[in-house]
Image (cartoon, rainbow, N blue to C red):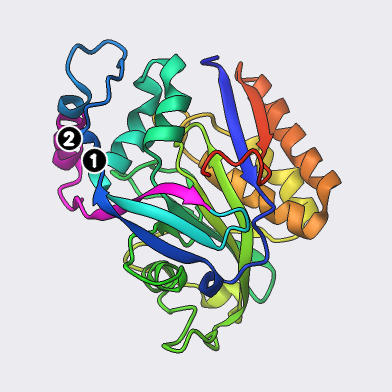
Amino acid sequence: MENTHTFEFWSYLNYLSPEEIFLQDLPGSSSLEESELEVKIKGSDVSLGERVLQDWGNAMEVNPQMTNKKTSILRTISPDGREIKRCDSDYMSAFWIKKNLPEVDVSQQREFIRNKFSPLGLGVVTITSDGYVLIEKRPPNVAAPGMLLAYPCGGIDERQENLVGAVNSEFRGELGFEAFDDENRLNDNIGNIYSLGIIRESAENIPLYTFFASINKPSTEIKSTKEIKQVFLFPANPRKLVDELPRLYSPRVTGEGIEGMCVPNTLAMIGLYVKDKGGERLFGEYMDRISQTAETQGIEIDTIEHTPRTNPFQ
């Protein structure tokens, strides 16, 4: 149904360090602009590849600083979450999926993204030493402008043995320091870091390997960086997050009415944090409150909790 917003959780893939999650690169590459997938796009007669190129060109006119860098397409996740097989793709493809997948005929969306083309990213629920979750307000002329996003958050495109390199890249760019040193030991700025699982939601359709990180810095020492311009702080207490964040639900990341609302994948990442720190009952209440907010917007929330048996990336 077009008025259904799906939240998926792989919460069984928890308590792993980034150095325990290994990346295996498969040969070949996959990009939408070169794809021969027969995908029906609403209100468009051009092929998928032509449409991707058109939309990328339009986006470049708005934000010329964007680059079509390499990114990763998820192929499989091992039952214990410790091995990810992926192949190369490009940011142009991932960008199109994030912004334009809703234009694909609804009967094809899940099949298209789940089995054919799934960009891979990571997100971190970062807690300061004085008990706040780090949230950024997205700047204009980027994806999800004006919305609230937990950070660090980004793609997994590092050519590394494990996820340490990708985690360090996001911490360096968005917080100004790395999480691990050259010997994969935690730096002094980090208290702890471990996986909460994987999330995916149907507004952007990008699986995010989600981590919890405690940092040895108070909120007063968190400054804006080149990538993070405006920092918001929310109390990290799970009860308070359940009370405050669901009212900021939005079913989309484009269009009117998104200013000041949460990017949906942030609500999903925070959901794993609430489950980890507050338990199943509080997580259930959190998702119920999101559903109640969504209902006022004519949206039905569909929550899927995967197991190793139902994991679609096998």
Q: Do we see residue 262 in this rendering? A: no
Camera-nearest residue between 91 and 256: 91
Camera-nearest residue between 68 and 270: 68
Q: Which residues are magenta?
A: 52-77
Amino acid tagged 1: Ser
Extreme-right residue of the structure: 281
Residue at the (82%, 53%) spot, across then down: 279
Residue position for label 2:
34
Residue at the (54%, 37%) spot, across then down: 201
Q: Residues within 10 Å of mark 2 (few under 14, many from 20)?
A: few
The answer to whether mark 1 and mark 2 are in CB contact below 8 A is yes
201 inside magenta stretch: no
Q: Which mark is residue 31?
A: 1
Tell me how far mark 1 sits from mark 2, CA to CA: 6 Å
Amino acid tagged 2: Glu
The N terminus lies in quadrant: top right
Q: Do we see residue 227 in this rendering? A: yes
Left or right, residue 279 beside residue 180: right
